[in-house]
Amino acid sequence: MITVLSGGTGTPKLLQGLKEIVDPTDLAIIVNTLENDYFSGVYVSADIDTVLYTMADMINEEFWYGVNGDTFITHERLEEIGCPELLRIGDIDRATKIQKTQLMVKYGLAKAVEIQAEKMGITSKIIPMSEEHSDIKIITDIGELEFHDFLIKHQAQPDVLDIKFSKVSPAVGVVESIINSDAVIIGPSNPITSILPILSLDGVKDALKDTYVVAVSPIIGSDSVSGPASKFMKALDIEVSSVGVASLYETFLDNIVIDDKDYDKKQQLNQIVNKVTITNTIMNSLDAKKNLAQIIIDSIP
Ligand code: GDP
């Protein structure tokens, strides 16, 4: 069994490759819930839904958010009647979110996701990192912003001075999944807002110390492939490079996978982590995703 730690863009790309080369029933995916909140009357768990849609081959790969080919009739009508939405939610995507909101009242988030995954024909286990609400604030030069306000309303433009998030408890199955795995893959997700929230759950770092951990760097050279990861790393005084990423995971990391373009970082990385794997980590085709997934699987002892 392999456990993957995931956000909602970089790691889902890797999951598309992994599910082609590993029996999906041997995969467990622990997903960030830091940014989850209610919008337009429904519970939005963007990273979880992206992982669900990815594993069900429904994901909109242009945005890594929502369903491929979705329509926006409800979204447009809400605007017409004076109820504009901060998040643009498609009609099919909204059905997922309505169902999750209803299931959560009865069963909680983890069980709701389990039921939805089963309905979508997904055989991998998808585990939200927590059942609890996280409070995240992006401290910027224009003031303290909610995560989605920073990302969508302000297009991630303000200078970031700090990031604060509340501590929550791990959902049932998070620590157990890591302990029972042959290896854990930390996907190329935002280290600050997707991976650190999972690592800060009680018991997770200790469990990772006892498991083989391989991480893929989301930073190539001195920038992220997409999104605000580099801005967030800078705000927390972490070097924006694969070395900075490795230093965040140093206490439990066994192997870091970096891009060919970063071969000159190997020596420096070897002082932090036992094994450095160098390959193409840009996942711009299914072949590239499968190749990267295969290299990761082959590196697990
Ligand atoms: P979010 O939840 O939407 O922020 O998405 P994630 O945290 O899962 O992923 C965001 C990170 O994915 C960014 O830091 C990107 O640098 C990284 N990323 C996206 N595509 C790729 C890729 O093809 N290769 C690598 N190495 N990183 C990627």
Image (spheres, rainbow, N blue to C red):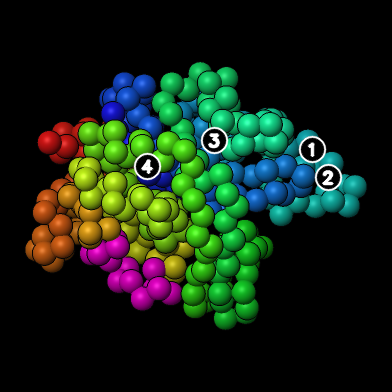
How many numbered marks are there? 4
Q: Which mark is residue 110?
A: 3
Which residue sits at x=53%, y=28%?
Answer: 114
CA distance separating discs 3 and 4? 14 Å
Helix or strand or loop: what does disc 4 sit on? helix
Closer to the camera in the image, 150 or 184 = 184
CA distance separating discs 4 and 2? 41 Å
CA distance separating discs 3 and 1? 27 Å
Mark 4, residue position: 175
Mark 2, residue position: 78
The amino acid type of the residue labelled 1 equals Thr
Cβ–Cβ under 8 Å for marks 3 and 1: no
Closer to the camera in the image, 146 or 151 = 146
CA distance separating discs 1 and 2? 6 Å
Q: Residues within 10 Å of mark 3 (few under 14, many from 20)?
A: many
Q: Residues within 10 Å of mark 1 (few under 14, many from 20)?
A: some
Helix or strand or loop: what does disc 1 sit on? helix
Mark 1, residue position: 74
Q: Main secondary structure of the magenta part?
A: helix
CA distance separating discs 1 and 4? 39 Å
Magenta span contains residue 119: no
Which residue sits at x=49%, y=74%?
Answer: 162
Q: Is residue 278 visible?
A: no
Q: Is residue 245 above or below residue 173?
A: below
Image location (x, y in percent) of residue 210: 21, 45
The amino acid type of the residue labelled 3 equals Ala
Image location (x, y in percent) of residue 16: 38, 32
The amino acid type of the residue labelled 4 equals Val
Relative side of 159 to 20, left or right: right
